[in-house]
Every structure is written in structure tokens, then in C-alpha cells.
Image (tube, rainbow, N blue to C red):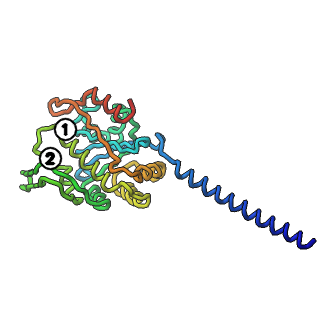
Amino acid sequence: MVTGLLLILVSSILLKSFYDSQDKDATVNVSQNQTAIFTPDSTYDFSVLMTLSADNDKTPDKYMTITYIAKNNTFVLMPYLPNAVIDGGNTIKQICEQSGEAEVAKLLSSKTGLSINKYIRFTKSTLTELFDMVGNTTLTVPSEIKYENKKDNTVTIIKKGTQIFTAEQMYAYLTLPDYGVKDELYPCKLNATVISSFIDQNFIGTSSKTLDEYINFIINFTNTNIEQSDYDAKVKAIVYTLSQNKSSVTDFYIPYGDKSGDDYIIDDNSWNSAKKALGTG
């Protein structure tokens, strides 16, 4: 009788241990499945206006939006000429000088169909420091560039060919006043190509911990309206995209048009094409 009770008791303990183990395995499997099936949707999309000025007291001369499209795992770059007209007779640079980046972002939103409500203004010191933090970039220069600055009698020479650009060299290449090319949009094309290469070469495979360091620098040392909560809401999707087995996570679109005096008028068809490229039209 005692032996029978012991057998029943031992059997019950073993069965309970077995079912507890099964429950734990099931919980682990559910957790793993939840992680595995995460794919970013359009709620993670965002657009940021990025500008570049020589220092905080100067109006920016470089303008670019970066739009994250989650379903495509892509960051779309759209650079603009500072003399591009986007509001009646006012250029982007004039609007920025009068009302700041927030107003430029608002007007670009109305043209592109995007929701651009965040901006970052870089200066020479902050952009070169970010380049230095992230890493060097290999670029191919199609032909030698020689720029003579008559104001301070300096000469900048960038040799033809594939080469590694340091932070200072990247900044110099991006901000040359004259590339010796008869193409009004050449600065936009170059900026898009350079920043695209910078992102693809340095950000793919980046961990959330490293991204945290970069956003901390941007929030604390640049002129921006991005807050920590904005980043926290998007970082999961960004890390997902950067972890994909892709050689590139960038694309770019160059708004085109015609010169009108000193201004550049973006064609209506270009805005329509931009909307298609961005999925907003």
C-alpha cells in the first residue's frame, strides 16, 4: 500500500515537471516567434530635414531630406539647391534665413506629401565630428578637382580615382563652391552620392548601442528638434533595416527644373515624380 502511494506521488511529480518544462519551452518559442516575425510597417516611417552651415551664425547652404520607408527597408535622400524656389518667389535659403528649418520642412512637406517635422542643422565642426565618430568613407572621384579660393589664396585639389576620405576631406568635398562642372544640379548629385556611400559603408550592421551614441551626439551638440522619445519610437525599425543582408539601404531622388535668373525653379513634373519615388503620390 505504501509502495503504491509512493509510486503515485513520484509519477505525479515527474508529470508536473514534464508539463512545466513544456510550458517553458512553449513560452520561449512564442517569444522567439514574436521576435522573428517583426517587420517594420509604415508607422515607423519618418522624414528629417538636414542642413549644413559653416557655423551657427550663418544661414545653411546645404539642404537634404532623408526619408525612411520601412516597408522597403530604404532611406531615400533628396538634396535641394539653396536657390531652389519652393514658396512663390522665395528660395529655400531665404526661407531658412527668415523663418528657420521648421518652415522649410513645412513647405517641403506640402510639395512632397511627406510629413517632415524634424530637422538637424549641422555646422562644419559638428558634421566633421560625426564623420570622425562613424568612420571614413571610400569614394570614387570621376575627375580631378582644383578649386582656387581667391579670398584667402588657398587651393584645394581632390585627385581623380577611388580613395578613402577622412572627416575633414569629406567636409571639404561636400562644400566646394565650384566643382568645375557645367551642371546646375551637380552639387546635389554629388551630395546624394557621398552621403549615400557614407550611410551604406558605415551604418549597415550597426547595433542599437552604437546608434544610441550617434543620436546622443546629435541631440546634445547640434541644432535639432529631435528628442530622445522620437528616436526611441523608431530605433527598433532602423536596426531591423540595418541588419538585413543588403549592400545598400539608400536611394536618392534629385528634384529637377530650370534656372530663372539666380533662382532654380523645380518643375511640377519633378514634384510628381518625387511623390511616386516616396510613395506619397
Amino acid at dot 2? Pro
Residue drawn at x 43%, y 43% is 70
Q: CA distance from mark 1 to mark 2?
A: 13 Å
Disc 2 on helix, strand or loop? loop
Q: Is residue 210 visible?
A: yes
Task: Report x, y in % for residue 130.
Answer: 30, 58
Image quarter hosting the N terminus:
bottom right
Observer-side mark, 1 or 2, equals 1
Tell whether 179 sits left or right of 245: left
- For disc 2, the neighbor class at 10 Å (few under 14, some 14 to 19, many from 20) is few
- For disc 1, the neighbor class at 10 Å (few under 14, some 14 to 19, many from 20) is some
Q: Is residue 141 above or below residue 79?
A: below
Task: Report x, y in % for residue 150.
Answer: 6, 51
Q: Give the labeled residue for mark 1.
A: 185
The circle drawn on residue 257 is none
Residue drawn at x 14%, y 38% is 183
- Of marks 1 and 2, which one's residue comes earlier in the chain? 2
Contact between marks 1 and 2 (CB within 8 A): the answer is no
Residue drawn at x 31%, y 49% is 121
As rendered, which of 211 and 162 lies closer to the eye? 162
Q: Is residue 22 above or below residue 91?
A: below
Task: Report x, y in % for residue 234.
Answer: 46, 48
Image quarter hosting the C terminus:
top left
As rendered, which of 9 and 270 lies closer to the eye? 9
Task: Report x, y in % for residue 5.
Answer: 89, 69
Q: Give the labeled residue for mark 2.
A: 177
Residue drawn at x 22%, y 39% is 81
Disc 1 on helix, strand or loop? loop
* Residue placed furthest toward the top: 268
Q: Is residue 40 above or below residue 239?
A: above
Amino acid at dot 1? Leu
Q: How many marks?
A: 2
